[in-house]
Image (tube, rainbow, N blue to C red):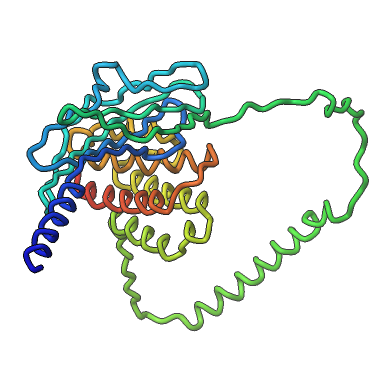
Amino acid sequence: MKKILLIASIMISAIAGAVAQKPSVKVALDSTYVIIGMPTTIHLEATVPEGQDIKFPDIKGKGGVVAYDDSLRFLLELGNEMPKIDTLRASGGVMTLKTDVEVFAFDSATLFIPPFEFVTAGDTLTTNSLALRVVVPFDSIEVDPAKFADIKTVIDPEFVLMDYIWWILLPLIIILLIVASYFGYGYYQKHKTEKLVEVKEVEKLPAHVIAMNALEALAGKKLWQSGQDKQYQTELTDILRQYIEDRFRVNAMEKTSDEILDELYELAEQQKSSLKNLRQVLELADLVKFAKYKPLPDENQLSFMNAKMFVEQTKFIQK
C-alpha cells in the first residue's frame, strides 16, 4: 500500500511540474488610448522551461505592427529598433523573457491588433488580441450662422454716478495721504532712535528642493485619489515646468511639451532616462487635459514617481 502511495505521489509531482513548466505568452499595451503621432509601448512576454528556445514575433521584418479598422489595414510604425530581450530566471526551472516595442499611429481610428505568434519546440503559441484608440487632441469647432445677430446702432450710455465716484474720492484720498504723511514723519522724527537694525536676506532655496517640497505637498492633497485627475496632472506638470525654468533657464511655462523636450535635448546625452521620465509625465498630462483621457491609478502613480526621479537625476546637471 505504501509503495502504491509513493508511486502515486511521484506521478502527481511529475504532472504538476510538467504543468507548471508549460510555455505561456502574453502581450499588453501601456494604454488603450493614444494621441495621434504620439508613441505607445507594446509589452511582449514569454515564460518557458529553462534552456528551451522560443522565437519572438518578427515585428521588425514586417516593418511594424499590423492593425485593422474594420476592413482597412494599418501599420503601426516602429519608434525604436527592436530592443534586446531581457531574460529573468525564477525558481522551479522556468525563465521569463520580455521585450518592449514602441510604436506610432498616424491616423485616428479604433484599431484591432491581431494576436502575436511565438514559436517554441515546434509549437506556435498565440497571445490575446489588443484594441487601441487613436485620438486627435482637439475637436473641430463648428459655428452656427443662425446664432449671429445684426450689429446694433451706437447709443449713449446712461449717466451712473458710481462710474465717476473715483473722480470725487481720489482727490480726497490724496489730501488724506499728504496729511497722514506729514504727521507720520513728525512722529518718526520725535521718536526715532539710533539703534541699528540688521536685516538678513532670506536665502532662496535651490530649485530641486523647491520642486521636491511642492511634489510632496501635491501628494498630500490626494487629488487623483478623489477623482480630480485633470487638476492633479495640471499641478504636477506646473511643478516640473517651474523647476525647468529655475534649473535650466528655459521658459517652460509658455512652451508646449514638445518644445520643452526640444530645449532639453542635451539631457539625451547625459541622462537619457531622465528625459524619458519627463516625456512620460508630459504626454500623459496632455492626454488627460486635451483628450479627456481617464488615467489608471498606476499611471498617476508612475507620473509622480517619474517626476521625482527627473528632479533628483537632473539637480546637478549643467546645461
Asked which quadrant contains residue 44, the reply is top left
Q: Nearer the viewer, residue 38 or 188?
A: 38
When the figure is inspected, residue 135 is found, relative to residue 202, above or below; the finding is: above
Q: Nearer the viewer, residue 207 or 275?
A: 275
Asked which quadrant contains residue 204, the reply is bottom left
Asked which quadrant contains residue 217, the reply is bottom left
Residue 294 relative to residue 98: left or right:
right
Instruction: Identify the residue shown where x is 26% and y is 35%.
Output: 100
Instruction: Identify the residue shown where x is 42% and y is 42%.
Output: 284
Instruction: Identify the residue shown where x is 24% and y is 28%.
Output: 124
> In this rendering, does residue 36 appear at all?
yes
Q: Nearer the viewer, residue 133 or 243?
A: 133
Residue 180 relative to residue 113: left or right:
right
In which quadrant of the rendered image does the N terminus lie?
bottom left
In which quadrant of the rendered image does the C terminus lie?
top left
> In this rendering, does residue 319 appear at all?
no
Q: Position of residue 251 (x, y in %)?
A: 39, 39
Q: Position of residue 110 (x, y in %)?
A: 51, 28
Instruction: Identify the residue shown where x is 48% and y is 56%.
Output: 224
